[in-house]
């Protein structure tokens, strides 16, 4: 970008013309073209620095366009959900629609442990609401090299095919299954 030394800048005369054209309702681009050697953004910046009043939008752009009335015989258009991206290879998961009851597991009081009572061989499966007073961990004997007992291992570690087949309860860790 080369400097143009014939640019007169913002002289008092040009500021007066700017104020007059602005009050006449010309756009910043039109004012810049009228003044010459001035860009649209320079006009906007000068108007802002001078504190000139903002102009109201024209009535055609300010008011929303009136809608046509729908005839009684015309069905209402229902918007369909939009899918984004390439969905050609997306897997269509099927979920159970009926809610499945989670198996009720009763853990003996002697086996239940608090966080401070857990050892490396304790099952760390959380039971209940962590913010509630009756929250505890399973505390059973953990399976070899695992964090959970054999029953909770079956809930926590499932092959992907079992998860799809079992539906939503499998992802929440409450579906039944075989356990050792």
Image (cartoon, rainbow, N blue to C red):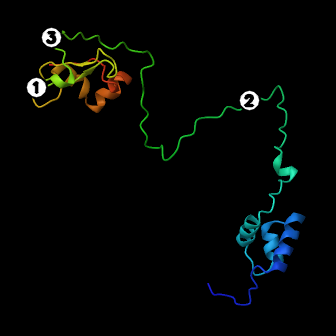
Labelled disc at residue 110:
3
In three-dimensional space, the C-alpha distance between marks 2 and 3, rounded to whole angstroms, equals 63 Å
At a point 57% along the width and 39% down the height, the residue shown is 82
Q: Please tell me in which quadrant of the rendered image residue 97 appears.
A: top left
At a point 44% along the width and 15% down the height, the residue shown is 98
Name the residue that disc number 1 marks. 121
**Tag 1 secondary structure:** loop
Please identify, in this view, whether the residue under mark 1 or under mark 3 is nearer the observer: 3
**For this rendering, which residue is in front, 100 or 149?**
149
Q: Is residue 174 left or right of residue 141?
A: right
Mark 2 residue crowding within 10 angstroms, few (<14) / some (14–19) / many (20+): few
Please identify, in this view, whether the residue under mark 1 or under mark 2 is nearer the observer: 1
Which of the two discs, 1 and 2, labels the residue nearer the N terminus? 2
**For this rendering, which residue is in front, 81 or 32?**
32
- Disc 2 vs disc 3: Cβ atoms closer than 8 Å? no
Q: Is residue 148 above or below residue 6?
A: above
Q: Please tell me in which quadrant of the rendered image residue 45 appears.
A: bottom right
In three-dimensional space, the C-alpha distance between marks 1 and 3, rounded to whole angstroms, equals 16 Å
Q: Is residue 44 left or right of residue 94?
A: right
**Tag 2 secondary structure:** loop
Q: Please tell me in which quadrant of the rendered image residue 23 appears.
A: bottom right
Name the residue that disc number 2 marks. 76
At a point 48% along the width and 43% down the height, the residue shown is 87
Q: Is residue 124 visible?
A: no
């Amino acid at each position: 970008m080369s400097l143009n030394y014939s640019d007169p800048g913002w002289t008092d005369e040009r500021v007066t013309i700017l104020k007059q054209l602005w009050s006449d309702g010309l756009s910043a681009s039109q004012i810049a073209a009228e003044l010459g050697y001035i860009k649209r953004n320079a006009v906007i910046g000068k108007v802002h620095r001078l504190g000139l009043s903002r102009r109201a939008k024209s009535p055609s752009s300010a008011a929303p366009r009136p809608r046509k009335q729908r005839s009684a015989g015309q069905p209402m258009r229902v918007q369909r959900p939009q899918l984004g991206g390439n969905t050609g290879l997306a897997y269509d998961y099927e979920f159970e629609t009926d809610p499945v009851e989670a198996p009720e597991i009763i853990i003996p009081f002697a086996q239940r442990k608090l966080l401070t009572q857990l050892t490396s061989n304790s099952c760390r499966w959380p039971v209940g609401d962590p913010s509630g007073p009756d929250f505890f961990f399973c505390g059973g004997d953990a399976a070899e090299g695992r964090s959970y007992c054999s029953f909770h291992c079956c809930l926590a570690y499932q092959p992907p095919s079992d998860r799809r087949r079992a539906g939503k309860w499998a992802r929440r860790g409450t579906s039944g299954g075989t356990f050792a």
